[in-house]
Amino acid sequence: MIGDLWWIALVESALVGWVGLIAGLRGWHWVHTERRLLPRRRQAQTEMTRHLLGESAGTTLAELPYEAQCALLMQLATSLSGEARQSLVEEARRGGHLAREGRQLRSWRWWVRLRAVRFFSALGVVPEVLDQLLVDPEPLVRAEAILLVATQPTPPRVDNVVRELFGPASLARYASQMVLPQLGLAASQSLVRQLESPPGPPAVALRSAAAVASAELLPAALRFSAAPDPAVRAAAVHLLAAIGGSQSAARLVELLDDPIRAEAAAALGHLSHWQAAPQLARLLTDSEWQVRYQCALALHRFGPPGRLFLRQASQSTHPEAASIVRYVTDLDE
Amino acid sequence: MSEFLDLLEQFVLLYFLLVNTFYGWVLLLAGAEMRQHARRVDREQSWRLLGAKIYPRISVLSPAHNEEATITDSVRALLNHHYPEIEVVVIDDGSKDATMAVLIQQFELVPVEPTYDRRLNTRALKGLYRSRRTPNLLVASKENGGKSDALNLGLQLATGELACVVDADTLLEPDALQKLVRPFLASDGVVAAGGCLRAVNGSRVEQSRVTEVRAPRTLIAGIQTVEYIRAFFLGRLGLNRLGGNLIISGAFGLFRRTSVLDVGGYDTSTVGEDMELVVRLRRLGLEQGHPSRVDFVPDPVAWTEVPSSWTVLNRQRDRWQRGLCDSLWRHRQMCLNPAYGSMGLVAFPYQLVVELISPLVETMGLLLLVFSALLGVTNLPFALGFFVAAYGYGTVLTALSLMLEERCFPGQRPPTDLPWLLLWALVESLGYRQYAMLARLQGMFRWLRGRSDWGRMERVGFARKAAS
């Protein structure tokens, strides 16, 4: 028994030593490699930049390890635009990087596809298989593919981007929200179609639609402003505020009696719809702080018409109304 | 009598074998989780996020008490954080020094009407201030009520969708929030996320940034460094795969602000407010069908100074153990309750059996050794088995955790750090571990006697460059 324990202790000591050796070698190798690569990487970066700007003929990019080449290309892509960016893409094409990464896009391993699509995304190059990537089972891959849609937005691609907004929270949905403003009218038309019969909960799509806010979204916004779900109504209010117009304003005034009246008040302030000042002033005595705050802010945004009501409220006997008016006034000062 | 001693010895050995086997399993899961994480972030370009207007607004809550020497640098570091939508809320918790005067002068603060959306009871607000030149800074001055009370006020004053809780002397890496926000973007089911807390002792700090990472060369700080590495890269990372964590460090955590308000904010009657909040968030979330997942993300980093004296270490571990006891007791209905899923069946029992009971069992083991030696009936196989099972195996797990840290932050440490870290891992069991265990036992007994104070935490500070 004692002999067994000594063996176990020996094995444990060996394991600790082995871990130390592996970690040490790994750390030493990484530091050594980085030290060796750092000056070469800097030189390649300088030469590459000069080459892309037309100041020199060649580069030493090919002398770096492949992964370092990709990292450098991705890094340079962040700071270049126009012709220099196009030259960078050409370098990547000539060097075989696009071909190699393009093959990786077809891998059955999601992490390989992800690395490859990130390379294309960083360089702003649309791969041939973008449409397949937009329906990839891995959300991270879809997210990167979505970022590329703005470069070549075909109707089916835009539909995929918009459809993502109706799905569960994911980085792909977040990417869709980011990209939507860049898609403009195409996104607006797709939103109108998909809001007719939403493939999923519409709240995020409605809220994101505010970034494109075209008049053709008004019917959908008005329809969803009467939805039973308060989150959907609030999102519709956000969209109405972005679209603007008399119909939006009228509906928002109606919603001042709704549980989502704070959002409605904020939207009226955004629209500078000063005609709603009396109704907003009435809500300065609301029991909810957010409602009082948004009404006071909206009145403040209206300029002189709104400030008249604020001055009256500041002298009112209702302490909370007076307090919120002072707060908003202090913020302005 | 000897049969009874044998029975106790068998129990102690069996306990450590089971615990360390569980740890071994958790280590494998941690390795798998790290590999998954590395694949997710490979070639990631977080700079893209900086221009995104739709990024969730984060309110960084920084409670402060008597911090006149460091408050300016702390707040500036937070305001300069690389995150597109950030708000900094400083809550002065009744400081008796010139903390408020310094803030008012340095940031050109002007008083505003002290009104806010009250959802929790806190000590009275004395004043609310905005900055003329930094619109995303809000400063509140309140009556002293403790850290939890200050955070509760901050939660109500904040406007962000997410709230980040940091200690006043915690240093965030510039991209920490960009990385820590990922789980919230990826899922609506996440209610809180914790990042990696690392010991800053020994590292070089310049203008509130860690410019050179270095393992401490002193015993207490060095051992705590490996403790932190083990806790985060083995414990928390592995628990991600076992249903999530029950704790997020009070020095660095990100929460859905409205979720925390909905469950009543921090409990001011416990010293383990960080753990108690997370357990409550998860429990009520499961009971009421709300978001309840808590994730640990290994690469967002916050630096903190670990205690460098035995006395302060004792107070800290005492307080942690009292917090653990309190949190587990308050939510004891979750233990082994299938209604709470993996949290009730795995995470909670783990905290109970491994974290709570281990000081008792380990003490029992040591006492058995001493007792046997005094009686002249030392059971050598037991003694060796105890050291092998309790300490040797633990050292192996620590060493493997170092590899996970190195995988997450490759090349960040100089090559000379590894021998030091291995040394601290080896000597941890030669006195330090026993001291910490006694502090934890002390904490348990103090909790049983109803003590709920924090004790005095002294810090050296890292405002100047660290000495080499």
Image (cartoon, coloured by chain):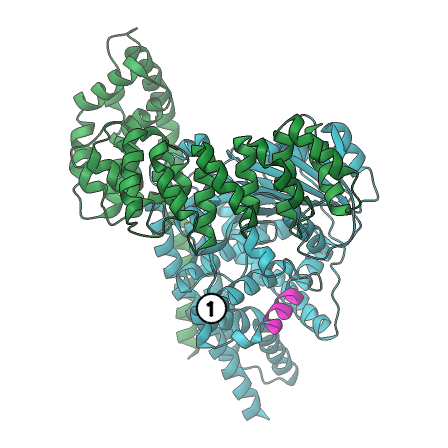
Chain colours: A green, B cyan
Indicate the position of residue B262 as horizontal and vertical percent values: 58, 59
| Residue B324 on the magenta segment | yes
Question: Which residue, as the protein is rendered here, is positioned at the far right?
Answer: B96
In the figure, residue A4 lies in which quadrant?
bottom left
- Above or below, B94 against A245 in this view is below
The residue closer to the viewer here, B289 or B273, is B289
Which residue: 27% across, 31% down?
A186
Asked if B401 appears above or below B408 in the picture, the reply is: below
Seen at 75% across and 74% down, the residue is B449
Give left or right: position of B326 versus B395. Answer: right
Q: Are there few (<14), some (14-19), or many (20+) residues within 10 Å of tag 1?
A: many
Label 1 secondary element: helix
Question: How many numbered circles are shown?
Answer: 1
Query: Residue B241 is drawn in which quadrant?
Result: bottom left
Which quadrant holds the C terminus of chain A? Answer: top right
Q: Is residue B450 above or below residue A185?
A: below
Q: Give the x, y percent position of residue A130.
A: 20, 36
From the image, tell me which residue sits under label 1: B343
Give the farthest residue toward the top.
A55
Q: Quadrant of the N terminus of chain A?
A: bottom left
